[in-house]
């Protein structure tokens, strides 16, 4: 069994095709959240790590949606074994058919982004976790628009090109970028991932936060250490 031990929770990742990544932990640790958030929705739970990190940081209830059965069961176990099991739930459902009557103050997702021509013929679970055929960006933007409260915020992490496409889709719904961060391996490398906050508000933070994993000496960057210190046992 593959287990990753965080400071306040244990993450098993034997069955989910979407394994823990550095950019996912940065996303979960950095994501700013407004004080008035009462509930949240994660689209594509995987192991559940993002929901668990937010549950450690904030007191609101979090619901997650996961289409793959193995990933759903693993996220469910991780939630039940956490200190926040009373306010973490996961449902096994295709987000395109998600029929919750609730709206959410916060929606967040680290969605699949590979195109179908890059699929593996031997690993259906991995295809679901990483390829857009199960959750096209159009369906993701439509679903966010449907389930987000009027004053809510959606945080999405994608590579640069895909984020450019997604921005256009969100703009069609009147959801605009209000806050941004870029994740880099070091100061010399281009952005690995972009994190955007989308909302219907016209208020915008023009500063783009740059998040570096390593410094010029290939050591962990001080900002990375500070950000992940509440979570990772190595700090």
Image (cartoon, rainbow, N blue to C red):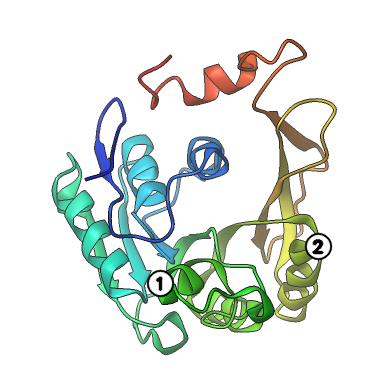
Q: Position of residue 166 (x, y in %)?
A: 73, 70
Residue matched to label 1: 125
Q: Position of residue 119 (x, y in %)?
A: 59, 75
Foreground residue, 15 or 228?
A: 15
Task: Please identify, in this view, whether the residue under mark 1 or under mark 2 is nearer the observer.
Answer: 1
- Residue 27 tag number: none
Give the residue drawn at x 68%, y 66%: 200
Report how far apart the C-alphas of labels 1 and 2 lie in the structure: 24 Å
- Would residue 156 be found to the left or right of residue 96 on screen? right
User: The residue tagged with tag 2: helix, strand or loop?
Assistant: helix
Q: Residue furthest front?
A: 122
Q: Position of residue 218 (x, y in %)?
A: 69, 16
| Quarter that holds the C terminus | top left
Foreground residue, 211 or 5?
A: 5
Foreground residue, 25 or 15?
A: 15
Q: With respect to residue 85, does 165 lie above or below?
A: below
Residue 57's quadrant in the figure?
top left
| Quarter that holds the N terminus | top left
Residue matched to label 2: 161
């Amino acid at each position: 069994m593959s287990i990753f031990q965080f400071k306040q929770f244990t993450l098993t990742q034997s069955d989910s095709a979407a394994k823990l990544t550095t950019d996912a932990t940065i996303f979960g640790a950095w994501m700013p959240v407004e004080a008035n958030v009462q509930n949240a929705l994660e689209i594509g739970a995987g192991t559940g790590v993002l929901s668990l990190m937010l549950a450690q940081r904030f007191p609101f209830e979090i619901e997650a949606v996961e289409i793959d059965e193995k990933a759903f069961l693993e996220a469910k176990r991780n939630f039940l074994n956490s200190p926040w099991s009373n306010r973490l739930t996961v449902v096994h459902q295709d987000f395109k058919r998600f029929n919750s009557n609730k709206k959410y103050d916060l929606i967040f997702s680290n969605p699949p982004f590979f195109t179908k021509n890059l699929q593996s013929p031997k690993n259906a679970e991995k295809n679901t976790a990483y390829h857009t055929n199960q959750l096209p960006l159009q369906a993701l933007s439509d679903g966010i628009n449907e389930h987000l409260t009027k004053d809510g915020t959606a945080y999405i992490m994608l590579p640069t090109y895909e984020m450019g496409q997604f921005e256009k889709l969100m703009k069609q719904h009147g959801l605009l970028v209000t806050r941004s961060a870029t994740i880099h391996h070091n100061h010399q490398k281009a952005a690995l991932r972009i994190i955007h906050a989308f909302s219907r508000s016209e208020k915008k933070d023009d500063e783009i936060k740059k998040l570096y994993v390593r410094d010029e000496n290939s050591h962990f960057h001080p900002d990375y250490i500070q950000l992940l210190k509440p979570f990772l046992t190595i700090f």
